[in-house]
Image (cartoon, helix red, strand yellow):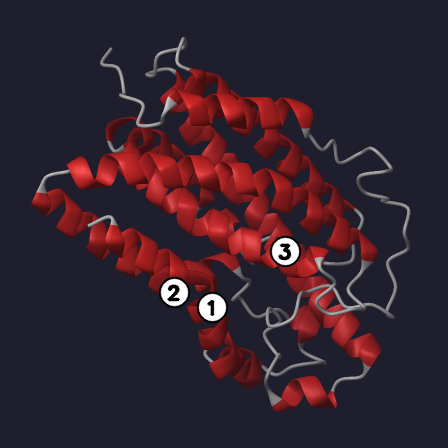
């Protein structure tokens, strides 16, 4: 079995290992997330800019209670999709662990990341469980999660640079969502969503640092044709990342609040394009600088 070369400096891996050991967030500890906070219609559940109606006339027409339900539906779909995405990442990391040197400190860090992603999956799933009135099946990644989960370990072991590019793309997106939620943007975002954001933000920072370092060390060493192919892949990913991450399937659960036409228009609206640009422009520039 061929070994996958690790493109991470040992010093960084050791720092990340130490940080993971010191700052681990167990989502069922009350001081981390207080799951007893009631779900009500006086809060919103999506950070600023993330709701499909943000920046549209529909948002102004909704009452607080109506926007509360709509954003809770969106948040529940979003977190369920992220739960599936974290599972696919874990399958990739576990496959990669089989082919990397277990004495390299990066091996231990990837194991830390697997453990942290398991915590995130439990955290996201718990949110879905406490919102039983929101039907999520068929509204997200369950449609293609199985075939992707079968392909992901192959990509991880044969083309790790693609794995870390994909990981960085989606981690940056999740990190932006988490930071806005943790910083109370908006002020009346629900406390549990805020606590989920804070927990996710701290651990995602380590995951992003690891992926960035791997790419920083490996991409400049790739043959030119491989770099060109990787650049085209990145462009495709960035174009579709938001549509994959956020719920884009209309549901009768929200038909009394937003029409199908308004929903589709919101997905392609100016506020969504600004959101994409704000999140991914720095990442695109960073990756372009790597070649």
From the viewer's side, name the closer residue of 149 and 94. Answer: 94
Query: What is the distance, in whole Å, between disc 3 and disc 1 at their CAs?
Result: 13 Å
**Residue at (30% x, 26% y) in the render:** 157
Query: Do labels 3 and 2 touch, CB within 8 Å?
Result: no
| Residue 85 locus on image (x, y percent) | 50, 43
| Residue 236 locus on image (x, y percent) | 29, 59
Query: What is the distance, in whole Å, between disc 2 and disc 1 at their CAs?
Result: 6 Å
Mark 1 burial class by Cα count in 10 Å: few <14, some 14-19, many 20+: few
**Residue at (43% x, 23% y) in the render:** 11
Quarter-of-image position of residue 146: top left
Above or below, 56 against 26 in this view is below
167 displayed left or right of 79: left
255 displayed left or right of 224: right
Above or below, 242 against 263 in this view is above
From the viewer's side, name the closer residue of 166 and 122. Answer: 166
Mark 3 burial class by Cα count in 10 Å: few <14, some 14-19, many 20+: many
Query: Do labels 2 and 1 touch, CB within 8 Å?
Result: yes
In this view, the residue farthest toward the front is: 11
Question: In the structure shown, which secondary structural element does the residue marked by tag 2 occupy?
Answer: helix
Quarter-of-image position of residue 156: top left
**Residue at (52% x, 66% y) in the render:** 248
**Residue at (62% x, 49% y) in the render:** 80
Q: Is residue 104 visible?
A: yes
Query: Label for residue 281?
Result: 2
Residue identified by numbered label 3: 179
In which quadrant of the rendered image does the N terminus lie? top left
- Which is more N-terminal, label 2 or label 3? 3
Question: In the structure shown, which secondary structural element does the residue marked by tag 3 occupy?
Answer: helix
Query: Label for residue 252?
Result: none
Above or below, 37 against 52 in this view is above
Q: Is residue 237 visible?
A: no
Query: Label for residue 278?
Result: 1
């Amino acid at each position: 079995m061929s070994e996958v070369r690790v493109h991470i400096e040992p010093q960084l891996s050791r720092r990340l290992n130490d940080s993971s050991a010191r700052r681990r967030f167990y989502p069922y500890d009350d001081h981390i997330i207080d799951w007893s906070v009631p779900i009500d219609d006086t809060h919103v559940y999506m950070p600023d800019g993330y709701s499909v109606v943000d920046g549209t006339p529909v948002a102004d027409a909704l009452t607080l209670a109506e926007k509360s339900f709509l954003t809770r539906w969106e948040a529940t779909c979003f977190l369920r999709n992220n739960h599936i995405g974290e599972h696919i990442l874990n399958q990739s990391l576990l496959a990669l662990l089989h082919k990397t040197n277990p004495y390299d400190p990066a091996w231990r860090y990837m194991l830390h990341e697997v453990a942290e992603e398991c915590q995130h999956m439990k955290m996201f799933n718990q949110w879905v469980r406490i919102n039983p009135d929101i039907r999520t099946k068929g509204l997200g990644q369950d449609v293609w999660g199985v075939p992707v989960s079968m392909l992901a370990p192959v990509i991880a072991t044969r083309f790790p640079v693609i794995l870390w590019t994909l990981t960085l793309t989606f981690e940056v997106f999740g990190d932006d969502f988490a930071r806005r939620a943790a910083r109370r943007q908006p002020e009346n975002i629900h406390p549990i969503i805020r606590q989920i954001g804070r927990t996710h933000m701290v651990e995602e920072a380590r995951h992003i640092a690891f992926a960035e370092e791997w790419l920083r060390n490996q991409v400049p060493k790739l043959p030119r044709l491989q770099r060109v192919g990787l650049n085209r892949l990145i462009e495709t990913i960035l174009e579709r990342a938001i549509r994959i991450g956020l719920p884009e399937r209309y549901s009768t659960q929200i038909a009394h609040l937003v029409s199908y036409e308004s929903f589709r228009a919101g997905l392609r609206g100016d506020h969504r394009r600004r959101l994409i640009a704000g999140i991914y422009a720095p990442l695109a520039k960073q990756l372009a600088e790597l070649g």
